[in-house]
Amino acid sequence: MKDYPDRGGRYGRRLYYEDDEFESIMDELRARADLGPLEPGRGVDVERVLKRAFDVEPDFRELPEHMLGRTEFQPDGQVAIEISHVLSELAEGNVVARRRLRSTLGHEGGHVALHRTLFLRDFATPSLFGDEPQREVSACLCRNEVIDAPSSRASGYHGEWWEYQANRAMSALLLPRDEVRREVPAVLARHGHADMDQALMAEDGVRVIRELSNIFDTSISLTLFRLQHLGFVPQDGRQQRLEWEVGRSAE
């Protein structure tokens, strides 16, 4: 991780993570949670990860409209994750809501794993030269409908680099790289395709992605987001077409 001053930015600092760092950090969190083998159809136990890795249990409560969850940071490193109780209740009997809840929990966990250092007391130490902008030490990061349609491009977050990073972390947590690399060829083979490029040529991409989303219990949009970053989806015009098809596809 690299840390840069960010004059005029929301936090006064900007953090940068390499692709492999998202993977290694989320691998470590799952290992600390002692999850055992992934069971297809159930997915990663996100609440167990939060409890075992951070000693945090989400507080399901009323949140402002369009806010799915938020993470509150304290100067001493303590955090609190709040999740919409409406979403939690819907998740009990609705697959789409359950996967949205899992994504929200994973996203907030990503903020804790990646961004807690932004709010620690040490980061509030004034510059010796008086040229660093001062920021509130206690703060919260809020989530809304971005959860439902994560963009594979950082430019799609309107400068909110922390939200892009939290989505990268969330996708790496819920769709572990090694398991995805094992499942993708198996799913493609069941549909008669040698690779994802062939599936797209046959206009079968959405069906393949949907099956993968069922294996990992993630939304189809999140599954596509993950496949893009792992290099399974060709970086050409078909990617935009697939994003459009996924966006209009019912969960």
Image: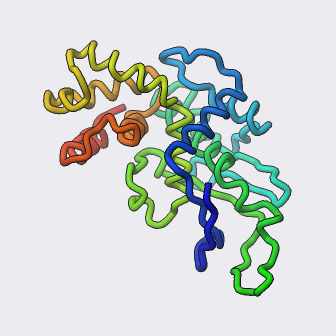
Image quadrant of residue 184? top left
Quarter of the image for the N terminus: give it.
bottom right
Image quadrant of residue 200? top left
Q: Is 245 placed left or right of 172 in the picture?
A: left
Tell me: residue 94, above or below residue 75. above
Residue lying at 26% horizontally and 46% vertically, measured from the top left: 235
Residue lying at 74% horizontally and 35% vertically, measured from the top left: 53
Query: Which residue is most to the bottom?
Result: 130
Q: Is 244 placed left or right of 144 in the picture?
A: left
Residue 217 screen position, x and y as percent? 48, 25
Residue 205 screen position, x and y as percent? 24, 30
Quarter of the image for the C terminus: give it.
top left
Residue sitting nearer the eye, 142 or 26? 26
Residue lying at 63% horizontally and 31% vertically, measured from the top left: 46
Residue sitting nearer the eye, 140 or 85? 140
Q: Is 180 placed left or right of 127 in the picture?
A: left
Residue 220 screen position, x and y as percent? 38, 34
Query: Which residue is most to the right?
Result: 76
Residue 208 screen position, x and y as percent? 29, 25
Image quadrant of residue 207? top left
Tell me: residue 100, above or below residue 48. below
Tell me: residue 31, above or below residue 80. above
Tell me: residue 132, above or below residue 160. below
The number of callouts visible is 0
